[in-house]
Image: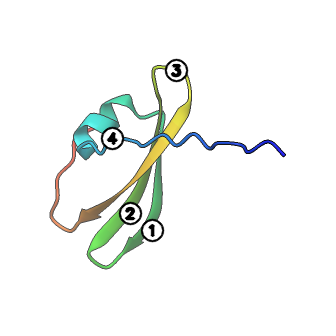
């Protein structure tokens, strides 16, 4: 029986401002009380879609 190896790619954590510049899709997952949960998607240099989740606290400012 041949054993299959799994290839794991880790996404480098970057500040939300950097991810916003390259985002192809921005989803608001939830907006409760004093925080907003966002899921940002983008395409990497190989054309594969990547995503990362962020939580924005009340009073935070982000620029699009």
Q: Mark 4 points at which residue?
A: 12
Find out whether the residues at labels 2 and 1 contact each other: C-beta distance under 8 Å: yes
Q: How is the image coloured?
A: rainbow
Q: Mark 3 points at which residue?
A: 46
The quarter in which the C terminus is drawn is top left
| Circle 4 SS class | loop
Do callouts 1 and 4 mark residues in contact (Cβ within 8 Å)?
Answer: no
**At x 33% / y 41%, what residue is drawn?**
12
Crowding near the residue tagged with mark 4, few <14, some 14–19, many ≥20 C-alpha atoms within 10 Å: few
Please report the residue visible at 23 percent of the width from the left and 40 percent of the height from the top. 17
**Residue 49 screen position, x and y as percent:** 55, 34
Q: From mark 3 to mark 2, how far is it between C-alphas?
A: 27 Å
* Label located before the other in sequence (3 or 1): 1
Report helix, strand or loop for mark 2.
Answer: strand
Which of labels 1 and 4 is toward the front? 4
Q: Nearer the viewer, residue 37 or 4?
A: 4
Above or below for 22 versus 26: above
How packed mark 2 is, by other alpha carbons closer than 10 Å (few <14, some 14-19, many 20 or more), is: some
Q: Mark 2 points at which residue?
A: 37
Near mark 3 (Cα within 10 A), the count class, few <14, some 14-19 or many ≥20, is few
* Disc 3 and disc 2 in contact, CB within 8 angstroms: no
Q: Report the Cα–Cα distance between label 2 and label 1.
A: 5 Å
């Amino acid at each position: 029986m041949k054993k299959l190896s799994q290839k794991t790619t880790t996404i480098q954590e970057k500040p939300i401002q950097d991810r916003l510049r390259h985002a192809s899709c921005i989803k608001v997952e939830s907006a409760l009380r004093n925080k907003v949960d966002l899921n940002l998607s983008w395409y990497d240099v190989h054309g594969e879609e990547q995503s990362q989740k962020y939580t924005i606290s009340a009073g935070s400012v982000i620029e699009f």
